Image: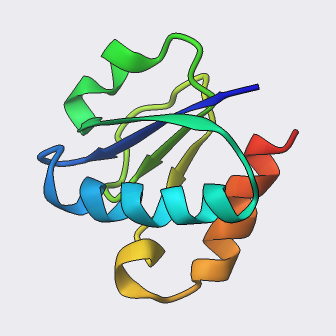
């Protein structure tokens, strides 16, 4: 079953692009099919239908019914394995 992941950052371009690239690599290694929506944090609400996960480089100011992860580790390189484990724990339920 294809998962739907929202990848968000402040501008919807720079850091979310890096996140999407790293996320695609992780998903490919684990044979997980996913539709990844890249957007600004302010646009998350527009893409929530059927979403399984939100990943963001920015701290989210509101709560969502969808699990959300702050994935700054994809940019810093610190604790990347923990972030990957957290993503997989949500997607493989």
Question: In the depicted view, which residue is nearer to us: 13 or 26?
Answer: 26
Which image quadrant is residue 14 in? bottom left
Of residue 26 and residue 79, the one placed in the foreground of this image is 26
Placement of 92 over or under 5, stated as above or below:
below
The quadrant of the image that shows the N terminus is: top right
Left or right: residue 13 compared with residue 71: left
As displayed, is residue 2 above or below residue 25? above
Q: Disc count in the image? A: 0
Q: Position of residue 65 (x, y in %)?
A: 60, 22
* Residue occupying the point 75% across, 67% down: 85
Question: What x and y, as percent, mark residue 15?
Answer: 23, 62
Residue reaching furthest to the bottom: 78
The reply, left or right, for residue 91 in relation to residue 19 is right
* Quarter assignment of residue 62: top left
Residue found at x 67% / y 28%: 2
Q: How is the image coloured?
A: rainbow
* Residue 47 to residue 42: above or below: above
The residue located at (59%, 37%) in the rendering is: 34
Image quadrant for the C terminus?
A: top right
Describe residue 52's horizontal placement relative to residue 89 as left or right: left
Residue at the extreme right: 93
Front residue of 34/56: it is 34
Vertical relation: 45 (above or below) 18: above
Provide residue 73's location: percent of width, then percent of height: 46, 76
- At 67% from the left and 55% from the top, the residue drawn is 87
């Amino acid at each position: 079953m294809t998962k739907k992941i929202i990848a968000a950052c402040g501008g919807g371009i720079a850091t979310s692009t890096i996140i999407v690239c790293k996320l695609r690599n992780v998903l490919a290694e684990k044979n997980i099919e996913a539709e990844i929506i890249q957007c600004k944090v302010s646009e998350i609400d527009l893409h929530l239908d059927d979403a399984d996960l939100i990943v963001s480089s920015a701290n989210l100011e509101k709560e969502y019914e969808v699990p959300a992860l702050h994935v700054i580790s994809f940019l810093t390189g610190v604790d990347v394995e923990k972030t990957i484990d957290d993503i997989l724990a949500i997607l493989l339920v």
